């Protein structure tokens, strides 16, 4: 057992938000309307920002401008709702304003049934475009084997309709040409193109052809993929990434005056910002409202995930020149200073009436999808499709209730696990958990979710409860430590350290919400694996024996400070 002193940032937050009433002695939460969505912003008070511009997992980005607003979509694979739409007015402070879909498909893989899952698959690398008043988002799903193009006139609040294609268009990019024709460019190493109907509803027969035969720098390694296609000043520009063997991710640009080619190629960025030889690559460019150009690419940044990187673009001889001195800047001025700090991670007091931005769960004949009267903030995503019968924000006002509706063996096959991104360089997440109504075989708590996960929680066996720290050892779990308890409300916390690729997570519990005790093992986090996603905070409750038990999460909080391990006593 290792007792520690919490940092002033975390402890101060707890003390400021709790007050005991004289009449009952119960803890009452104050300032419940405060949301700390700016805590993950990289904007500084002097009008500058640091790269990565979002220090969190936002991979495969595509960005557009509509008037003075910027919109960005990203890969979310197995999470639900999927394909987030983010908005910014300054290209630095982004907030989630919508999702393209609530659920992509109802198969066993998306619902964690019959031993199936969609980890690392789901929806990949989206393309985002705006044309004649309509927004379009396209992507491939490696779970269904289909490609999709969604469309709406209202990107922030509207319902999305979709077209389905029974073909896998890898890393697609839409191009609305100035002659009214519409193209889709896609592929890996060998880059293909098809022409679409003007509304993107179907592929025109006989239009499929190769436009770049061998998009790569060497025969070994990852060939060119991650297409982003544009037409600018009479030239067609095709942005691709490649990853030569023993090299790093490198950004390529192909250029031609004809859509069919021939194309000439230049390396437009080969830089790692001094981090682990992890190249900054894959993404696109856009013209800002002031006429300046910018590129939004991403970098593999260890266990936190794939992090967006913003940089200026200049033009020389009709070629884009990315970065400053052809390097991705570690910091630069905010393109449009003065806007509010925003982020894609936030606190939550689970007060239903205070949620002003939420995704909609449509009514359905499937009871698992029927709307249960609850709305979650847009920062949350479920691990796979939720079963809406077994979670609620309304059964106990001010709490997230998670019921057990099916049996599970471990965290990664448990349904209704609610997640948010972690963020760097360090972060902490902590919860208040009421376990009064757990049943034998139930396990509930707070996790660091990825393929090699860890969690701190409460398990109930033979009518007794224990605090437990568990970590994944691959296909099996290991209980690193258990602690007997005789109370129902506990506090759980995980610290994440992503500094200099440390990629370590530490687990804590508290019995009073003030004094924290470290429990179990340190978790060495790894990004690559079947999940192919940065680590996430995970709120969960699953049963290994009998369904019907439930737990209540009173609140979830995040901080950009972690426990000072040198203060251990």
Image (cartoon, helix red, strand yellow):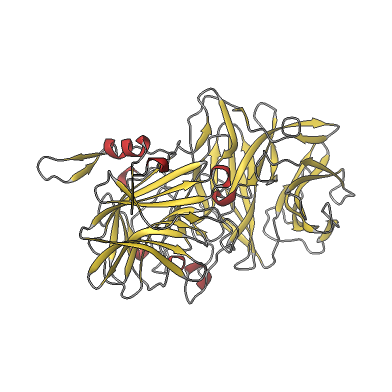
Residue placed most toward the observer, 489 or 274: 274
Residue placed most toward the observer, 295 or 529: 529
Q: Residue at x 58, y 26 (%)?
A: 336
Quadrant in the picture for residue 369: bottom left
With 547 as the anchor, is 316 left or right in this view?
right
Q: Position of residue 382 (x, y in %)?
A: 45, 58
Q: Considering the image in quadrants, where does the C terminus appear?
A: top left
With 159 as the anchor, is 133 left or right in this view?
right
Q: Residue at x 37, y 36 (%)?
A: 9
Q: Residue at x 55, y 51 (%)?
A: 303
Q: Position of residue 187 (x, y in %)?
A: 75, 58
Q: Residue furthest right?
A: 262
Q: Position of residue 141 (x, y in %)?
A: 62, 63
With 153 as the anchor, is 461 left or right in this view?
left
Residue placed most toward the observer, 120 or 446: 446
Q: Is residue 545 visible?
A: yes
């Amino acid at each position: 057992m290792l007792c520690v002193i919490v940092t002033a940032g975390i402890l101060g937050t707890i003390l400021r938000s709790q007050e005991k009433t004289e009449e009952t002695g119960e803890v009452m939460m104050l300032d419940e309307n405060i949301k700390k969505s700016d805590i993950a912003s990289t904007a500084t008070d002097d009008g500058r920002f640091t790269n990565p511009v979002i220090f969190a997992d936002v991979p495969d980005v595509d960005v557009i401008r509509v008037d003075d607003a910027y919109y960005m979509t990203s890969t979310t694979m197995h999470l639900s709702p999927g394909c987030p739409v983010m908005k910014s007015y300054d290209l630095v402070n982004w907030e989630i304003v919508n999702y393209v879909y609530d659920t992509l498909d109802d198969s066993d893989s998306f619902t964690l049934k019959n031993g199936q899952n969609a980890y690392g698959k789901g929806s990949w690398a989206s393309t985002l475009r705006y044309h004649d008043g309509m927004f379009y988002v396209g992507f491939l799903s490696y779970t269904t084997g289909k490609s999709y193009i969604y469309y709406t006139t209202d990107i922030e609040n509207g319902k999305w309709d979709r077209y389905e294609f029974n073909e896998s268009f890898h890393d697609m990019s839409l191009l609305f040409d100035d002659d009214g024709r519409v193209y889709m460019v896609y592929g890996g190493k060998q880059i293909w193109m098809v022409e679409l109907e003007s509304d993107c509803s179907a592929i025109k027969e006989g239009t499929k052809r190769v436009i770049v035969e061998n998009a790569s720098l060497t025969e070994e390694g990852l060939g060119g993929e991650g297409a982003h296609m544009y037409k600018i000043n009479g030239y067609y520009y095709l942005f691709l990434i490649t990853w030569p063997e023993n090299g790093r991710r490198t950004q390529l640009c192909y250029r031609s005056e004809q859509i069919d080619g021939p194309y000439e190629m230049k390396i437009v960025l080969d830089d790692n910002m001094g981090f682990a030889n992890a190249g900054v690559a894959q993404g696109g460019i856009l013209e800002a409202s002031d006429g300046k150009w910018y590129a939004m690419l991403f970098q593999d940044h260890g266990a936190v995930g794939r992090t967006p990187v913003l940089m200026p673009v200049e033009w020389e001889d009709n070629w884009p020149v990315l970065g400053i001195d052809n390097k991705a800047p570690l910091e630069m001025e905010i393109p449009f200073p003065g806007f509010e700090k925003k982020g894609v991670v936030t606190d939550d007091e689970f007060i239903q009436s205070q949620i002003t931005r939420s995704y909609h769960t449509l009514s359905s004949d499937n009871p698992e999808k029927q709307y249960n009267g609850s709305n979650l903030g847009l920062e949350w995503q479920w691990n796979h499709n939720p079963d809406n019968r077994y979670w609620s924000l309304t059964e106990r006002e001010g709490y997230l209730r998670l019921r057990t509706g099916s049996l599970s063996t471990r965290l990664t096959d448990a349904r209704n696990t609610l997640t948010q991104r972690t963020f760097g360089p360090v972060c902490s997440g902590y919860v208040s958990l009421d376990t009064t109504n757990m049943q034998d075989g139930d396990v509930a708590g707070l996790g660091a979710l990825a393929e090699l996960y860890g969690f701190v929680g409460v398990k109930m066996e033979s009518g007794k409860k224990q605090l437990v720290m568990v970590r994944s050892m691959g296909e099996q779990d290991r209980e690193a430590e258990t602690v007997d308890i005789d109370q129902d409300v506990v506090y759980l916390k995980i610290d994440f350290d992503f500094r200099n690729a440390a990629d370590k997570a530490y687990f804590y519990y508290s019995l009073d919400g003030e004094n924290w005790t470290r429990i179990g093992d340190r978790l060495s986090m790894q990004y690559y694996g079947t999940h192919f996603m940065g680590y996430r905070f995970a709120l969960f409750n699953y049963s290994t024996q009998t369904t019907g038990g439930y737990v209540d999460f009173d609140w979830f909080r995040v901080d950009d400070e972690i426990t000072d391990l040198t203060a251990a006593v």
